[in-house]
Amino acid sequence: MKSLKYLSNIVLSFALTFCCLQMQGHDFSAKTPDGTVLSFNITDTTRNTVEVTYEGLYNRPAESSISGEIKIPTTISYKSKNYTVTGIGASAFSGLYKITVVELPVTIMYIGEYAFSNCTSLETVVFPVRQPKIEETSFWNCRSLRDIELGRNWTVADFKLFRWADSVKTISVPEYITKITGIRYLKNLVKINVSEENKVFSSNDGILYSKDKKTLYNCPAARSGEVVVPDGVVAVLRGSFRGCDAVTSVDLPSTINKLEYAEFFGMEALKKIVIRAEKPFITSSCDGKEVFALKVSSQISVYVPKKAIGDYKALLSSEAGVYQTIDGKDKDVCIKEQLLQPSKIKKIS
């Protein structure tokens, strides 16, 4: 009996604590310089730091009049004390569907889980100069988001964070970015711009390249029509054209010598590949033999220099078999109907 009574007291204590949390929701509310009333939680009483949080019930936003453009301040005053705003808490703006623009201050160090989830009218986010920690779900279902302004001093750009933003058509890569991931998640991306001061990446005609323009890194998924890769490009990074279903032709320069055999597989609109290299190069291996092979649909023709047609056909592997990537790390079984056939190799007109 005593143990049951003890357990009941624990349950009751937990329920009362949870109820209090529900009723509290935040430490205080205050009006920002632009007139918006926001709720805050104190995160450090010694350093006087706060995070923006939800209003109303615990873990659930209440109906709110917050709308339009929101500028988060660097500091906020409450009861004659100044607090530095260092974070956007979990679910802080979740469900506030009237917000269109959010500008974050330089003091922001993190953006919590679902912070802006279901902000379905949010179009623009201006991030701080310094890179904050951003949770993977921070911008869940922000389907109207189209302008993403990364901070100038960021070093890593992970566009997977914006994979629900179907309206993003253009992205800009600032000066100090040295690593880019997740671009392929932006299904409607048309153009990639890179700061001329960036020392690792560059762009040409909206496509992402290495700074020296020897490697093609990424063709935006929603790019359409013809893609002409400039002279000097040596390699097409594996997966660069994945998902580019509206590209109709790809023109590769005479300098190209590295291309994976399955790079153009699954590109539904692709009908023409031009390879201007005067000597065929290895794209795969089959049965232990290095070969030139392309896993493509039957409607695709490949155009090469007239004097190199014989060499390309001699190196071509077009029979069913197990084909491997150049580095040998991946392989798959290709049937004959998936492979470029000799009759599809033609001269450049």
Image (cartoon, helix red, strand yellow):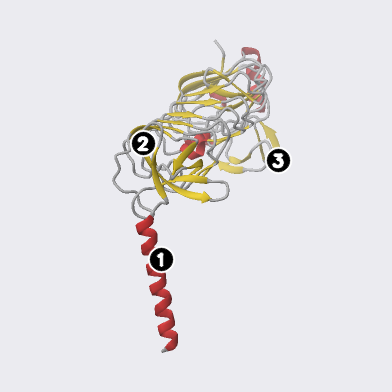
With 324 as the anchor, is 67 left or right in this view?
A: left
Verify CB contact (< 8 Å) between mark 1 and mark 3: no
Examine the image and state in which quarter residue 234 appears: top right
Residue type (three-letter) at the residue carrying disc 3: Gly
Mark pair 1, 3: CA separation: 67 Å
The location of residue 161, given as percent across then percent down, is 49, 39
Residue 137 can be seen in this image: no
Disc 1 is placed on an element classified as: helix
Disc number placed over residue 17 in the picture, else none: 1
Residue type (three-letter) at the residue carrying disc 2: Thr
Q: Nearer the viewer, mark 2 or mark 3?
A: 2
Mark pair 2, 1: CA separation: 30 Å
Disc 2 is placed on an element classified as: loop
Disc 3 is placed on an element classified as: loop
Q: Nearer the viewer, residue 310 or 151?
A: 151
Mark 3 = which residue? Answer: 288
Examine the image and state in which quarter residue 101 appears: top left
Verify CB contact (< 8 Å) between mark 2 and mark 1: no
The location of residue 93, given as percent across then percent down, is 39, 43
Residue type (three-letter) at the residue carrying disc 1: Thr
The location of residue 139, given as percent across then percent down, is 43, 41
Q: Earlier in the sequence, mark 2 or mark 3?
A: 2
Mark 2 = which residue? Answer: 36
Mark pair 2, 3: CA separation: 67 Å
Are there few (<14), some (14-19), or many (20+) residues within 10 Å of tag 1?
A: few
Identify the image quadrant of the C terminus: top right
Are there few (<14), some (14-19), or many (20+) residues within 10 Å of tag 2?
A: some
Q: Residue at x 41, y 41 (%)?
A: 116
Q: Earlier in the sequence, mark 1 or mark 3?
A: 1
Q: Is residue 229 above or below residue 135?
A: above
